[in-house]
Amino acid sequence: MPVSKKEISPCPIDAMLSVVDGRWKGTILWRLSEGPMRTSELRRSIPEMTERMLIRHLQELVSDGILVRREERRVPPCVRYAIADYGWTLVPVLETICAWGRGHLRRKIHGNGRAGLSSR
Amino acid sequence: MPVSKKEISPCPIDAMLSVVDGRWKGTILWRLSEGPMRTSELRRSIPEMTERMLIRHLQELVSDGILVRREERRVPPCVRYAIADYGWTLVPVLETICAWGRGHLRRKIHGNGRAGLSSR
DNA sequence: AGCTGTACTGACAAAGTTGTCAGTGCAGTT
DNA sequence: AACTGCACTGACAACTTTGTCAGTACAGCT
């Protein structure tokens, strides 16, 4: 039986998560929300990420319609990625996610930093 | 090098996703948003999911503070899971995600169901 | 001629997540 | 006495996602 979120799950939550899920997709989208970038710029701006992963994620985001790839046909190649019109509809959702995540991080750091079983 | 979203990534998007990420967590939360349920009820309500996974996800959600586990000490055991106060703060975020996901599913089904390269 | 930068691809290993299966303790039912 | 249901745990196999590494084509520079 299949296992991954990439399956055509009919659950809308899964459908959305399958788009942003991927170790670096959030970060990539975050960078691109400030403007288009070339592949190598993106890569340098997220040094912990490998080129292989960047490209794989970019391709998925493009095929999901979130990004557009614009290529200037010359040598050496120059490819620029930008958030597509459809991708912009995702940005407010990411902002909501991000806002909650910020609160969650705060909560984990000070105060209730209980990972695992609690008191009693 | 670490790889998973479970790491203490400082990115708020990752922080949020690490909470709902897991093959069945969305569905579990969805069910519980209609009211507390016993372990076995939940399991029966999502037949494709195995008991093992249910329990693993429940435990993670509890340790993230999203759910509360209430146990009536008797035999056979009776454990009920409910969305915690903190968990309710997540529900509107899930609704936002869900709304976008619904649109995305529609888009994939009819019309631009282009997975892969587009026309040209 | 050799090296660099760009944007990739392919093969494969490592790590992470899910699934399978067997087992636990105890009460109630047959 | 054997079986069922409940809420779990542990060991391990199967599958997915990431990471590593080598290689491609071509122009420009030295």
Image (cartoon, coloured by chain):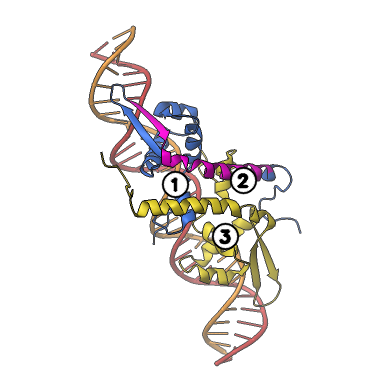
Chain colours: A blue, B yellow, C red, D orange
Compared across the picture, whether B23 is left or right of A71 comes to right
Element on which disc 2 rests: helix
Q: Residues within 10 Å of mark 1 (few under 14, many from 20)?
A: many
Q: Residue at x 35, y 55 (%)?
A: B109
Question: Looking at the image, which is closer to me, A36 or B20?
Answer: A36
Q: Residue at x 56, y 53 (%)?
A: B94
Residue B105 visible? The answer is: yes
Amino acid of disc 3:
Leu
Amino acid of disc 1:
Val
Earlier along the polypeptide chain: callout 1 or callout 2?
1
- Mark 3 to mark 2 CA distance (whole Å): 16 Å
The circle drawn on residue B29 is 3
- Mark 1 to mark 2 CA distance (whole Å): 19 Å
The x and y percentages for residue B113 are 33, 50
The circle drawn on residue A19 is 1
Q: Residue at x 56, y 72 (%)?
A: B41
Residue B56 visible? The answer is: no
Q: Residue at x 53, y 42 (%)?
A: A92
Is disc 3 in contact with disc 2, using a CB cutoff of under 8 Å?
Answer: no
Compared across the picture, whether B56 is left or right of C18 comes to right
Part of the protein shown in magenta: A78-106
Count the numbered circles shown: 3
Q: Which residue is mark 2?
A: A100
Q: Main secondary structure of the magenta part?
A: helix
Q: From this view, report whether residue B69 is shown above or below residue C27.
A: above
Q: Residues within 10 Å of mark 3 (few under 14, many from 20)?
A: many
Element on which disc 1 rests: helix
The x and y percentages for residue A63 are 36, 43
The x and y percentages for residue A73 are 28, 25
